[in-house]
């Protein structure tokens, strides 16, 4: 078996039309992870939430699945929407390795549903469609956090029929957009057919299935992309430039390769010349149990991809959200600066066309 340590956590972005349930879904995934595990089951990152594989496997109730998946978990970007997807880049591609498109099963496709699909097609990002709000289907009997097949079995034939009708409207729309799609448990080849998971972000029904499909997609399509070594110099993408009391300008960063350490020299994209600076502190959010501390952050000496982290360093004011950040050595500083510069130009030209 491939060494699990060499695959990093895939980064997931949630997309879809306004009010179709993106935020609720992210909250549910976060909540699921918190309640299902003992302390430490979930890690809150800066700008992202990590759901470890053990939490997902527990949720699915089949420990044998543990060995089927090689990724250590899933890292969800906390900001939903396609703006986050398109502005957050890595090496010219999308920062997110995987995506979820949420569509309200009762309302069907809306402008931002179409847009999300076009964007994912353009970036060739593997994704799953969540046919959300199944609990609103007339007569639906909710079963909190239950996998889809189990809750579906317990519905009356009428309700099952209503779900299928609505689901196949969604599948028909996907077909019109050029995607062969099917209810995910009827998909035999995810290479050819898009999986659609009926779910409810409010009751949690179908959510274990969504997580499992994402793990399956990572396993099938991303193995090469997710290879990394913790020994590599850190590479990341700036989520946000934020003023923090006592720290001045800080960067919220998603690290997607290698390791970033306190004291590292980093090069960051800006409107002008790339910024060269030294990491003064790496900050992570405190756990809920640590709120007695005055600061909401705690210092760590290093982070390894994939992870969200806040960077405190001198001279970050001009940094640009969406731009790259790379660790450099003294020897390759000029080379890294040139690389960051060319990546910035690429992003700028490209975002004009979204
Ligand atoms: P977003 O704009 O896509 O982030 O949508 P939100 O997550 O803010 O959800 C919009 C509204 O739909 C809120 O009132 C949610 O409570 C509700 N909602 C989201 N998902 C579900 C669901 O699965 N079932 C039901 N009944 N309501 C939902």
Image (cartoon, helix red, strand yellow):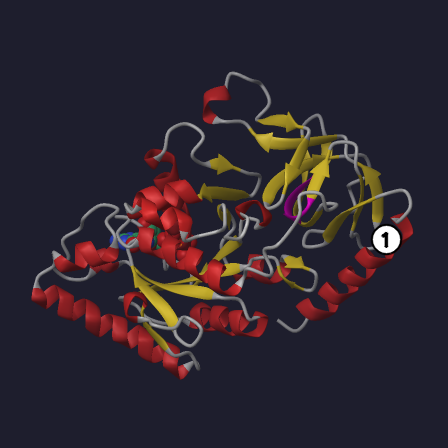
Magenta residues, start to end: 250-258
Q: Nearer the viewer, residue 20 or 257?
A: 257
x%, y% of residue 292? 51, 16
Q: Is residue 151 magenta?
A: no
Image quadrant for the C terminus? bottom right
At x 88% / y 55%, what residue is drawn?
Answer: 335
Q: Position of 275 compared to 176: left or right?
A: right
Give 38 or 83, whichever is nearer the viewer.
Answer: 38
At 67% from the left edge and 43% from the top edge, which residue is drawn? 230
Residue 112: % across, % down: 46, 68
Q: Is residue 257 magenta?
A: yes
User: In percent of the image, x 39 and y 75: which residue is there?
Assistant: 193
| Vertical relation: 52 (above or below) 209 | above
Q: Regarding mark 1 in the picture, which secondary structure is present there?
A: helix
Q: Is residue 39 left or right of residue 322?
A: left
Task: Give the residue number, with chain letter if any, for mark 1.
Answer: 337
Residue 338: x, y in percent?
86, 57
Residue extending furthest front? 1
């Amino acid at each position: 078996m491939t060494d699990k340590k060499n695959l990093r956590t895939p980064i997931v972005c949630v997309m879809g039309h306004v009010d179709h349930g993106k935020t609720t879904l992210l909250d549910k995934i976060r909540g699921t992870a918190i309640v299902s595990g003992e302390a430490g089951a979930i890690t809150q990152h800066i700008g992202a939430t990590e759901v470890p594989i053990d939490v997902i496997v527990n949720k699915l109730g089949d420990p044998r699945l543990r060995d089927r998946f090689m990724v250590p978990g899933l890292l969800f970007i906390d900001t939903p929407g396609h703006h986050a997807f398109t502005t957050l880049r890595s090496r010219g591609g999308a920062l997110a390795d995987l995506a979820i498109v949420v569509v309200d099963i009762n309302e069907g496709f809306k402008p931002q549903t179409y847009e999300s699909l076009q964007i994912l097609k353009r970036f060739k990002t593997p994704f799953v469609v969540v046919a959300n709000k199944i609990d609103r289907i007339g007569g639906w009997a909710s079963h909190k956090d239950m996998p889809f097949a189990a809750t579906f079995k317990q519905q009356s034939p009428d309700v099952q029929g209503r779900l299928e009708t609505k689901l196949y409207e969604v599948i028909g729309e996907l077909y019109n957009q050029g995607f062969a799609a099917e209810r995910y448990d009827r998909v035999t080849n995810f290479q050819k057919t898009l999986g659609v998971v009926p779910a409810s972000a409010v009751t949690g029904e179908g959510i274990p299935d969504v997580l499992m499909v994402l793990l399956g997609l990572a396993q099938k399509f991303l193995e090469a992309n997710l290879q990394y070594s913790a020994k590599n110099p850190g590479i990341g993408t700036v989520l946000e430039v934020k003023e923090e009391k006592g720290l001045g300008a800080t960067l919220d960063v998603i690290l997607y390769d290698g390791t970033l350490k306190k004291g590292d020299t980093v090069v960051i994209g800006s409107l002008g010349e790339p910024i060269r600076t030294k990491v003064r502190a790496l900050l992570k959010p405190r756990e809920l149990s640590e709120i007695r501390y005055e600061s909401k952050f705690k210092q760590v000496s290093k982070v390894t991809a994939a992870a969200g982290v806040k960077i405190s360093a001198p001279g970050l004011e001009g940094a640009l959200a969406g731009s790259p950040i790379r660790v450099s050595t003294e020897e390759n500083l000029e080379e890294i600066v040139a690389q960051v510069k060319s990546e910035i130009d690429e992003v700028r030209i490209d975002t004009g066309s979204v």
